[in-house]
Image (cartoon, grey):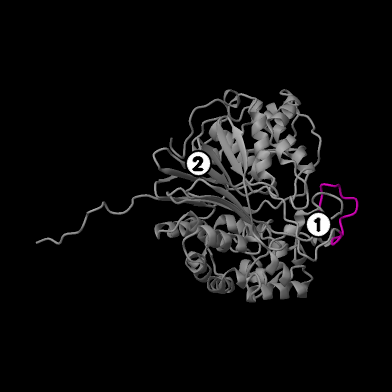
Amino acid sequence: MSGSGWRQRAGTQFTCEKHPAHGRNGMAVTNHPLASAAGMEMLAAGGNAVDAAVAAQFALTVVEPMMVGLIGGTTCHIRLADGSHRIVDGMSAVPLAGHPTMYRPIPGAPPQVYDVERRENQVGPKAVATPGSLRAWCHALDNYGTMALSDVMQPAIRHATQGFTVTPYLSDCIESAAAELLDDPFAADRLLPDGTPLKAGERLVQGDYAEALTLIAQQGEGALHGGPLGDLLVECMERTGGFISRQDLVGYRVVERAPIRARYRGWEILGPPPPAASGVHIAQMLNILEGYDIARMGYGTVETLHLLAEVLKIAFADRAEASGDPDFVKVPVERITSKAYAEERRAEIDPARARKWSGGLLAKEGADTTHLTVADGKGNVVTTTQTINSLFGARFIVPGIGMIPNDYMSNFDPRPGSPLSIAPGKRVTTSMSPVMALREGKVTYALGLPGGRKIFPSAWQALVNLIDHGMALQEAVEAPRIWTEGVVLEVEHGFPESVRQGLRERGHTLQIMPTVAGGMNAIQFHDDGSMTGAACWRADGAAVALGGGLARAGVRFVLPG
């Protein structure tokens, strides 16, 4: 099927806006073409999927500065050629100086609202949590890559030094965050020259960040975690009232975890375990859906979307009561992911009417994240999500290092006594969903996307699109989505009014959205050894494939005569 068309099926029809890529020897799919090219540069040079993924991640910090940075968090899913899987947890954590009453919550705010006075947990130095991204990327490269850090960083250094062309997407993001960015002289100078956001087509050069990247290429992760870049970050924190200390940076540790494994209609789905909420609740939601004939119900029908909405509400009700860092909170993984529990929850669903579910809402996660999926053709696959949490993170640039830090402290409950209350060293709970779907032990799909709390519901819908609705990969990542956590059902524009009205008649309160979550990117692995890569219209994503190969053995050029 063409990447720009649709096949006839029951339910909502839609047209894809992007085209997939096809190759045999490697695939890089990220949310910016320059980052995809950076990954492909490593594959073409003989590197493996981990080398390519780390190169693409560094490049994304340059070309998607609103989404990702070295003072951020990462959840990385790696499958090696030997068939083993591991989740590399580089999520941000509460600084050692953090405590349950470090902020002043807005008086009278409901439990699900984590807003504090002066927005200190969202904007500015007090919002910054201990970063883990750089250490996670270096851990992956050191343990599973084949190339030197200095080599994989070259595309990022080049784009920071020479600049790149601003896209309409980046320009719109700058405009959205302009009010706070203008308050910081360094961010304003870089992103809003003359007080106006950079326009599409203009060039963004980041000389100070290029120098910082060059130092990391020379000194490794220690340049930030204990070295001169870290000293500048700590100096900034001490001068402005932030909480990050040198001890936080030096003491941060990457954790490797075993993935959650779910079974669904003969498929095995692997995703991140706690502190990520994604793997647990994707497994839970698939278990509930297994009792229905989703293929017969059809994609995007009122019947299907009503069911998906009710299952989403169940997952978020349970998540509100049982999510968190497993070092601080007991998460009943076995019960939530069991088939028996799915039967209990399924029996409570009314197929004709929306209902309320027990549980509550969670604090908002920043929806401004990025994702990439890479494979090398040798059996190594990486799907990884990384972020500085909100759009442009804490919305300032650290002087001397050119980096925008995260605002992850906004994800913790500023009141004591809840599972997500603040405690020193506690890791952020995340919806990041770098997932893989296996058939008879072989990877068939690897995918992920940005979007805060909407990530794992969107990844789940993509899996249903592929497994139940038989969509092509490009269709599955671009298909219209829904999302709810129990109050309002968000519905993308792609669903027709007749379907929206049917959902209203079943008791759903709708909000029509331009997008639900962000730009998904994915790779499909075919039985003949080839691959398909797809990125969707919700971001600047691009799939780049490595085809061709080396010359046939025994071939040599013979001069005429």
Q: Residues within 10 Å of mark 1 (few under 14, many from 20)?
A: many
Q: Amino acid at mark 2?
A: Val
* Residue 123 screen position, x and y as percent: 75, 62
Left or right of residue 75, residue 83 in this image: left
Q: Nearer the viewer, mark 1 or mark 2?
A: 2
Whether 267 is drawn above or below 25: the answer is above
Please identify the residue farthest to the left as the structure is shown: 561
Which residue: 66% across, 62% down? 253
Q: Amino acid at mark 1?
A: Ile
Q: Label 1, secondary structure: give it.
A: loop
Residue 443: mark in rendering: 2
Left or right of residue 378, residue 139 in this image: right
* Residue 35 screen position, x and y as percent: 51, 58
Which residue: 79% across, 33% down? 357
* Residue 23 screen position, x and y as percent: 40, 46
Toward the viewer: 113 or 382?
A: 382
Q: Which residue is mark 1?
A: 422
Whether 113 is drawn above or below 237: the answer is above
Classify residue 346 by image quadrant.
top right
Left or right of residue 561, residue 553 in this image: right
User: Range of the magenta residues?
Assistant: 101-114
Distance between mark 1 and mark 2 Cα atoms: 38 Å
Whether 94 is drawn above or below 219: the answer is above
